[in-house]
Image: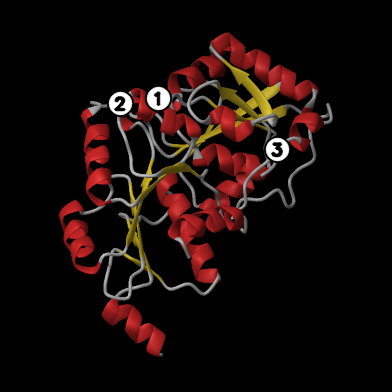
Amino acid sequence: MIKILKHFISGPEIAFFHEFHRPPYGGGNQFLLALEKEFLRRGLDVGRNKVGSHTKICLFNSFNFDFDRLSNLASRYHPRMIHRVDGPIGLYRGLDSNIDKKICDMNNSLADATIFQSKYSLDKHVELGLSFKNPSVIYNAIDSNIFNNKNKILPPDGLRKIRLIATSWSDNPKKGGPLLSWLDEHLDYTKYELTFVGRTRAKFKNARVVEPVSSEKLANILRQNDIYIAPSQDDPCSNALIEALACGLPASFLDSGGHPELVKEGGEKFADQEGVLEAIDTIAHNYKKYQEKIEVLSITEVANRYLKIFNL
């Protein structure tokens, strides 16, 4: 009871500053929900968008928070300030790169340390001439109670078509919509079938399209498929890709962003439209080999790495 009162009166020990949304939503939101859940499972005192005299750590995300409010709270209570950064958003979303400069300015104003989601993301910011406080790289992770390979269907055995799947919450064309439309037209549907789950501006003639669903439903759909298609460009650390890998799906991925760091030997890269067909065929002919090479960091390990940065 005393702990609860202290939390509400003096703030949580660990504060998350982020505009949380109920799933389905974007990857950053999904990851922070999983990290929050893991911290709470360990009995840590965690709260959202509140800092007080009891707060030791504040983890603030990208630019998805009230900067003026957090600046005032940080100057008053002096918690250790950790900035989680993705992007560069100018590349990832196809926006004006000034947003990355603004994020960097926020970082230099508030942060004690910075967590990038991939080495790609850190290196690209350096290329842009942007310097962040005490940077480290920690990949995202997912809620393994939801996204796992339990009850995963058996690998393709020649008795049915091989099931391909792509997913995305964002309908930004850089998520790979144009490439998926091309794949839909050129895929050999005597051997394969294609499913897309989420939001997209792409037009499909043959693929099965499913509207955004809850994490639990998405995990079940992933486990019913065989190969994941990751066509997004300049994606720093795709949660959608991690979710699929965790559910036991080797990945055919565009050689861009943080994809190679996540997939490693658990899939095949491609550089262009024709390449995706070759990558899919290669995985299909050596399915078990690629599936056995899948490596996904657990949320437990990722939480440990965050706590090390937190000095807790």
Screen quadrant of the N terminus: bottom left
Pair 3/1: label in front = 3
Instruction: State left or right for residue 151 relative to residue 53.
Output: right
Q: Which mark is residue 174?
A: 1
Cα separation between marks 3 and 1: 25 Å
The numbered mark, 2 or 1, whose residue comes first in the sequence reads 2
Instruction: Write the residue at 34% across / 25% down.
Output: 91
Instruction: Write the residue at 81% across / 32% down.
Output: 288
Instruction: Write the residue at 64% across / 39% down.
Output: 245
Q: Which residue is mark 3?
A: 294
Q: Amino acid at mark 3?
A: Ile
Residue 169 versus residue 68: which sits nearer the camera? 68
Q: Which mark is residue 305?
A: none
Q: Residues within 10 Å of mark 1 (few under 14, many from 20)?
A: some
Cα separation between marks 3 and 2: 34 Å
Coordinates of residue 162 in the picture (x, y in percent): 72, 28
Q: Which residue is mark 2?
A: 129
The numbered mark, 3 or 2, whose residue comes first in the sequence reads 2
Q: Residues within 10 Å of mark 2 (few under 14, many from 20)?
A: few
Which image quadrant for residue 267? top right
Give the SS element for disc 1: helix
Cα separation between marks 2 and 1: 23 Å
